[in-house]
Image: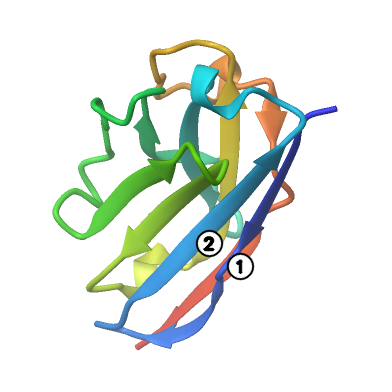
Amino acid sequence: QVQLVESGGGLVQAGGSLRLSCAASGLTFNTYAMAWFRQAPGKEREFVGAISTSGGWTPSAESVRGRFTISRDNAKNTLYLQMNSLKPEDTAVYYCAARNNWSPSISSYDYPYWGQGTQVTVSS
């Protein structure tokens, strides 16, 4: 079955950086568009960024544009999220998601497969 396992979360000071990884198994990774979402306490899950199967299309949320970069390594079945210039409002549980389509979507409803999440906490 499809498994997505996130790692790389932690506690960081504002202005710092983290790189999240999502290791995928049980799927033909290069045929799945991937995405990152996040959910802060008391808030709804929100879109962060997504990436097409080839990596050539990477839509992202306005709130992270210019600070976060999504990428993938199809040879390693791994999705990444490089987060720079972190802010306290980036504090959330970050989830990776997969869908069997070349094209990414910004809607969580379009992703049937999800990881368990990794906590990112940014202190001020």
Within the image, what quadrant is residue 6 found in?
bottom right
**Within 10 angstroms of label 2, few (less than 14), some, or many (20 or more) residues?**
many
* Helix, strand or loop under label 1: strand
Would you place residue 11 above or below residue 68 in this image?
Answer: below
- How far apart marks 1 and 2 lie (CA) works out to 6 Å
Which disc, if any, is residue 92?
2
Q: Residue at x 85, y 27 (%)?
A: 1
The reply to whether dot 1 and dot 2 touch (C-beta < 8 Å) is yes
Residue type, numbered disc 1: Gln
Disc on the earlier residue, 1 or 2: 2
Residue 80 versus residue 16 in the image, above or below? above
Residue 45 x, y percent position in the rendering: 55, 41
Expressed as whole percent of the image width and height from the top left, the position of residue 57 reads 25, 25
Residue at x 50%, y 24% (from the top left corner): 30
Residue 123 placement (x, y as % from top left): 42, 86
Amino acid found under the numbered disc labelled 2 = Ala
x, y (%) of residue 85? 22, 73
Relative to 50, is 118 on the left or the right? right
Mark 1 or mark 2, whichever is nearer to me: 1
Direction left: furthest residue:
66
Identified at 58% across, 28% down, the residue is 29
Residue that extends furthest to the right in the rendered view of this protein: 1
Residue identifier under label 1: 119
